[in-house]
Amino acid sequence: MTTMVGFLYPGYSAEDDFPRMESLLNAAGDDVLLPLVHTDIGTDAHRVDALLEMGSVDRITAKVDELTGAGAEAVVWACTSASFVYGWDGAGEQVRRLAASADRPASSTSFAFARAATALGLRRVAVAATYPTDVAALFVDFLHAAGIKVVAMRGSGIITAAEVGTWGREEVLRLARAGDHPDAEAVLLPDTALHTAAWLPDLEAAIGKPVLTANQVTAWEGLRLLAHTAAPCPAMGSLFA
């Protein structure tokens, strides 16, 4: 029986990761659909004020009927920065209101990172972010609230998701290597605007430990909401292995 999870994705950057992940999972023997719709982001900027507006419930729920009407059984806000920017409690309220609007289980990418790290038994991680340092620091605070210690954090100072979406394999590998730390059990790349789905095994091979990326954990979280156990899929990294 096909499992369908719907994703609310802000703007246009790395949305093609989702059909790629759907294909990878189904090629491994699964039966999933991962449709998405694009939300209106307002100002494309990794700034606190812009992110608070981007993640406002009115914006993220405006397209939810398109997903539920298509048959999505759960809905995930596929954005890290415009969820963790609200803090742990605020991000929880954001998800509760999304679930009420959708009348479906719901979550967000920030919670996906926390739950994926917990599922892998990770206690110490490094964060390699595309964001400016002040925004990346808010993600560190969010992870600390989840009981996950961040032993190193690197921000890249990129303001727009549009620029992040232009990065290719070499830029992503460079980011992961630069953000790693000897004490980290994994490296987290927290931006759904960053293409990573094609390079998950390369990322883990490059640094010799699990790598959790935003779009990867977002897909995993959607399936987790439905208690769907994905078929082993090494192409999707350690989280799906």
Image (cartoon, rainbow, N blue to C red):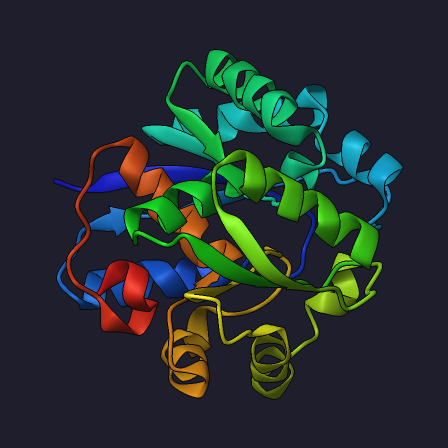
Q: Where is residue 236? Give x, y as percent.
A: 32, 67
Q: Is residue 8 left or right of residue 193?
A: left
Judge whether residue 10 can be spotted in this image.
Answer: no
Q: Is residue 179 visible?
A: yes
Q: Toward the viewer: 164 or 143?
A: 143
Which residue occupies the extreme front position in the image?
183
> Where's the N terminus, which quadrant?
top left
Q: Quadrant of residue 57?
A: top right
Q: Is residue 110 left or right of residue 32?
A: right
How far across and down, in percent of the image, does residue 116 sit?
37, 48
Q: Residue at x 50, y 29 (%)?
A: 66
Q: Give residue 203's quadrant in the image.
A: bottom left
Task: Identify which residue is drawn at 65% across, 46% down.
Answer: 139
Vertical placement of residue 74 versus 231, above or below? above
Q: Position of residue 93 (x, y in %)?
A: 58, 17
Query: What residue do we see at 76% from left, 35% from top?
Result: 54
Q: Is residue 241 left or right of residue 182?
A: left
Depth check: give the residue in front, 110 or 39: 110
Give the quadrant of the C terminus: bottom left
Q: Quadrant of residue 40?
A: top right
Q: Position of residue 49 (x, y in %)?
A: 88, 35
Residue at figure coordinates x 64%, y 80% from the top left = 178
- Left/right placement of residue 198 relative to residue 22 reads right
